Amino acid sequence: MIEPQINLFCGPLCFTHSLKSAFGNVSANASFGLVNTGKRKLLVTCFHVWEEFERSRTESPNLRMCIFLDRNPSTGTRGFVLDSLPIGQDKHLDLAIFDIEPLLSENQKLKCYPLHQSPAPWVEKGDRLVFIGYQGALRTATVDNAEFGSMIYAVEVSSVDGPIFQSDMSQARTIYKDRLVLQKPLEQPQILALGVRNKKIGTPLF
Protein backbone atom coordinates (compact mmCIF):
# COMPACT_ATOMS: atom_id res chain seq x y z
CA MET A 1 0.00 0.00 0.00
CA ILE A 2 1.47 3.35 -1.08
CA GLU A 3 -1.10 5.40 0.83
CA PRO A 4 0.53 5.23 4.31
CA GLN A 5 3.82 6.30 2.75
CA ILE A 6 2.26 9.34 1.06
CA ASN A 7 0.43 10.41 4.21
CA LEU A 8 3.74 10.84 6.03
CA PHE A 9 4.71 13.79 3.83
CA CYS A 10 1.51 15.79 3.28
CA GLY A 11 -1.32 17.38 5.22
CA PRO A 12 -4.12 19.96 5.24
CA LEU A 13 -3.97 23.71 5.60
CA CYS A 14 -6.86 26.11 6.07
CA PHE A 15 -7.85 29.78 6.08
CA THR A 16 -9.45 30.79 9.34
CA HIS A 17 -10.84 33.95 10.93
CA SER A 18 -10.37 32.61 14.47
CA LEU A 19 -7.67 30.69 16.35
CA LYS A 20 -10.17 29.46 18.95
CA SER A 21 -13.17 28.01 17.13
CA ALA A 22 -13.52 26.39 13.73
CA PHE A 23 -17.29 26.72 13.32
CA GLY A 24 -18.15 29.56 10.96
CA ASN A 25 -14.51 30.66 10.82
CA VAL A 26 -12.75 28.23 8.47
CA SER A 27 -13.43 29.67 5.02
CA ALA A 28 -11.30 27.37 2.85
CA ASN A 29 -8.77 24.57 2.99
CA ALA A 30 -6.12 23.02 0.75
CA SER A 31 -3.15 20.65 0.81
CA PHE A 32 0.60 20.85 1.27
CA GLY A 33 3.64 18.60 0.97
CA LEU A 34 6.87 18.62 2.97
CA VAL A 35 10.23 18.07 1.25
CA ASN A 36 13.86 18.02 2.30
CA THR A 37 16.22 19.20 -0.45
CA GLY A 38 19.30 18.39 1.58
CA LYS A 39 19.88 22.08 2.19
CA ARG A 40 16.45 23.26 3.29
CA LYS A 41 13.20 21.82 4.58
CA LEU A 42 10.27 23.23 2.66
CA LEU A 43 6.50 23.33 2.65
CA VAL A 44 5.08 23.22 -0.88
CA THR A 45 1.54 24.15 -1.82
CA CYS A 46 -0.13 25.50 -4.95
CA PHE A 47 0.36 29.07 -6.11
CA HIS A 48 -3.39 29.45 -6.57
CA VAL A 49 -3.85 28.65 -2.87
CA TRP A 50 -1.45 31.42 -1.82
CA GLU A 51 -2.96 33.78 -4.40
CA GLU A 52 -6.47 33.17 -3.03
CA PHE A 53 -5.25 33.68 0.54
CA GLU A 54 -3.69 37.01 -0.38
CA ARG A 55 -6.87 38.08 -2.19
CA SER A 56 -9.08 37.04 0.72
CA ARG A 57 -6.86 38.83 3.23
CA THR A 58 -7.41 42.15 1.46
CA GLU A 59 -11.08 41.76 2.37
CA SER A 60 -10.44 40.21 5.82
CA PRO A 61 -7.11 41.44 7.26
CA ASN A 62 -7.40 39.09 10.27
CA LEU A 63 -7.55 35.97 8.12
CA ARG A 64 -4.82 33.45 8.96
CA MET A 65 -3.36 30.47 7.13
CA CYS A 66 -2.92 27.45 9.42
CA ILE A 67 -1.08 24.21 8.76
CA PHE A 68 -1.40 20.88 10.55
CA LEU A 69 1.79 18.91 11.14
CA ASP A 70 0.55 16.23 13.55
CA ARG A 71 -2.01 13.78 12.18
CA ASN A 72 -3.06 11.92 15.32
CA PRO A 73 -6.88 11.97 15.62
CA SER A 74 -6.86 10.17 18.97
CA THR A 75 -5.21 13.11 20.76
CA GLY A 76 -6.29 15.92 18.47
CA THR A 77 -4.19 17.99 16.12
CA ARG A 78 -2.81 21.46 16.63
CA GLY A 79 -2.77 24.02 13.89
CA PHE A 80 0.12 26.43 13.50
CA VAL A 81 -0.14 29.83 11.84
CA LEU A 82 2.01 30.08 8.73
CA ASP A 83 2.71 33.78 8.99
CA SER A 84 5.64 34.00 6.58
CA LEU A 85 5.95 34.91 2.93
CA PRO A 86 6.89 32.33 0.29
CA ILE A 87 10.61 32.04 -0.41
CA GLY A 88 9.68 31.03 -3.96
CA GLN A 89 6.56 31.09 -6.11
CA ASP A 90 5.70 30.38 -9.72
CA LYS A 91 2.26 30.94 -11.20
CA HIS A 92 3.01 28.89 -14.33
CA LEU A 93 4.14 25.86 -12.30
CA ASP A 94 1.40 26.56 -9.71
CA LEU A 95 3.85 26.35 -6.81
CA ALA A 96 4.31 28.37 -3.63
CA ILE A 97 7.19 27.35 -1.36
CA PHE A 98 7.83 28.23 2.28
CA ASP A 99 10.71 27.63 4.69
CA ILE A 100 9.10 25.23 7.17
CA GLU A 101 12.10 24.37 9.39
CA PRO A 102 11.26 26.89 12.17
CA LEU A 103 7.93 25.11 12.75
CA LEU A 104 9.21 21.53 12.74
CA SER A 105 9.68 19.40 15.84
CA GLU A 106 10.95 15.88 16.51
CA ASN A 107 7.56 14.82 17.89
CA GLN A 108 5.39 15.68 14.91
CA LYS A 109 3.84 12.90 12.83
CA LEU A 110 4.54 14.37 9.40
CA LYS A 111 8.02 14.18 7.90
CA CYS A 112 9.86 15.88 5.06
CA TYR A 113 10.26 13.72 1.97
CA PRO A 114 14.05 13.23 1.36
CA LEU A 115 14.09 14.62 -2.16
CA HIS A 116 17.88 14.84 -2.11
CA GLN A 117 18.15 11.09 -1.42
CA SER A 118 15.29 9.90 -3.60
CA PRO A 119 14.63 12.38 -6.43
CA ALA A 120 11.45 12.02 -8.44
CA PRO A 121 12.04 10.22 -11.77
CA TRP A 122 10.89 11.59 -15.12
CA VAL A 123 7.32 10.61 -15.91
CA GLU A 124 6.83 8.30 -18.89
CA LYS A 125 3.77 7.19 -20.84
CA GLY A 126 2.03 4.35 -19.06
CA ASP A 127 3.25 5.35 -15.60
CA ARG A 128 0.66 5.22 -12.86
CA LEU A 129 0.60 8.18 -10.50
CA VAL A 130 -1.10 8.77 -7.18
CA PHE A 131 -2.20 12.18 -5.86
CA ILE A 132 -3.69 13.05 -2.49
CA GLY A 133 -5.59 16.22 -1.61
CA TYR A 134 -7.70 17.70 1.18
CA GLN A 135 -10.78 19.10 -0.53
CA GLY A 136 -13.21 21.65 0.81
CA ALA A 137 -16.15 19.38 -0.04
CA LEU A 138 -14.91 16.96 2.64
CA ARG A 139 -14.54 19.62 5.36
CA THR A 140 -16.87 19.93 8.35
CA ALA A 141 -16.59 22.17 11.40
CA THR A 142 -18.18 22.48 14.85
CA VAL A 143 -17.45 24.80 17.76
CA ASP A 144 -14.86 22.37 19.13
CA ASN A 145 -13.66 20.43 16.10
CA ALA A 146 -12.85 20.65 12.43
CA GLU A 147 -12.49 17.68 10.10
CA PHE A 148 -10.54 17.65 6.85
CA GLY A 149 -11.20 14.68 4.62
CA SER A 150 -8.71 13.60 1.98
CA MET A 151 -9.19 12.12 -1.46
CA ILE A 152 -6.71 9.97 -3.33
CA TYR A 153 -6.56 9.96 -7.13
CA ALA A 154 -4.87 7.23 -9.16
CA VAL A 155 -4.22 8.06 -12.84
CA GLU A 156 -2.28 6.62 -15.77
CA VAL A 157 -0.10 8.86 -17.94
CA SER A 158 -1.39 8.87 -21.52
CA SER A 159 1.22 11.21 -23.07
CA VAL A 160 4.24 13.30 -22.13
CA ASP A 161 5.32 16.65 -23.58
CA GLY A 162 8.54 17.73 -21.86
CA PRO A 163 7.72 18.73 -18.27
CA ILE A 164 3.97 18.37 -18.96
CA PHE A 165 2.07 15.10 -18.96
CA GLN A 166 -1.53 14.30 -19.83
CA SER A 167 -3.92 11.80 -18.32
CA ASP A 168 -7.52 10.85 -19.07
CA MET A 169 -9.25 11.91 -15.83
CA SER A 170 -12.40 10.05 -16.86
CA GLN A 171 -10.38 6.91 -16.15
CA ALA A 172 -9.06 8.11 -12.79
CA ARG A 173 -9.86 6.11 -9.69
CA THR A 174 -10.71 7.87 -6.45
CA ILE A 175 -10.62 6.67 -2.86
CA TYR A 176 -12.26 8.59 0.00
CA LYS A 177 -10.38 8.65 3.25
CA ASP A 178 -11.29 8.91 6.92
CA ARG A 179 -11.33 12.47 8.14
CA LEU A 180 -8.66 14.09 10.23
CA VAL A 181 -10.20 15.43 13.44
CA LEU A 182 -8.77 18.61 14.94
CA GLN A 183 -9.74 18.65 18.60
CA LYS A 184 -7.45 21.31 20.02
CA PRO A 185 -7.54 25.08 19.53
CA LEU A 186 -5.20 26.50 16.94
CA GLU A 187 -1.88 27.68 18.29
CA GLN A 188 0.12 30.63 17.03
CA PRO A 189 3.91 30.32 17.35
CA GLN A 190 6.33 33.20 17.05
CA ILE A 191 5.70 35.16 13.87
CA LEU A 192 8.24 34.38 11.16
CA ALA A 193 9.75 37.32 9.30
CA LEU A 194 10.82 36.18 5.85
CA GLY A 195 11.13 38.23 2.70
CA VAL A 196 10.20 37.24 -0.82
CA ARG A 197 13.15 36.17 -2.95
CA ASN A 198 13.16 36.71 -6.70
CA LYS A 199 13.85 33.10 -7.49
CA LYS A 200 11.69 30.47 -9.09
CA ILE A 201 11.77 27.08 -7.44
CA GLY A 202 10.19 23.95 -8.86
CA THR A 203 9.54 21.07 -6.49
CA PRO A 204 7.30 18.03 -7.03
CA LEU A 205 4.42 17.66 -4.60
CA PHE A 206 3.42 14.08 -3.79
Image: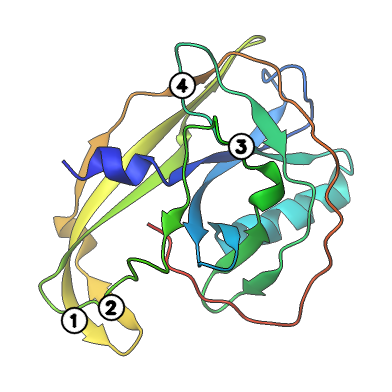
Identify the residue shown where x is 28% and y is 78%: 165
Q: Earlier in the sequence, mark 3 or mark 1?
A: 3
Q: Earlier in the sequence, mark 3 or mark 4?
A: 4
Describe the element under mark 2 as helix, strand or loop: strand
Q: Are marks 2 and 1 in contact (CB under 8 Å)?
A: yes
Q: Check contact, mark 3 vs mark 4: CB within 8 A.
A: no
In the picture, measured across the screen, residue 46 lies left or right of residue 66, that is left
Residue plotted at (62% across, 64% down): 97
Image quadrant where residue 8 sits: top left
Q: Which of the image's four quarters has the N terminus?
A: top left
- Give the labeled residue for mark 1: 159
Residue behind mark 2: 165
Vertical position of residue 120 compared to residue 34: above or below: below
Vertical order, 32 against 151 (above or below): below
Kind of residue sitting beneath label 3: Ser
The residue carrying pointer 2 sits among few (fewer than 14), some (14 to 19) or many (20 or more) residues within 10 Å by Cα, namely few
Residue 183 % position (x, y): 58, 13
Of mark 2 and mark 4, the one earlier in the sequence is: 4
Q: Position of residue 40 (x, y in %)?
A: 60, 64
Q: CA distance from mark 3 to mark 4?
A: 15 Å
Report the mark closest to the observer, 2 or 3.
Answer: 3
Residue at x 73% of width, y 45% of height: 82
In this rendering, would 81 be left or right of 121?
right
Residue 87 at x, y = what percent?
71, 68
- Label 4 amino acid? Asn
In percent of width and height, residue 187 lies at 75, 26
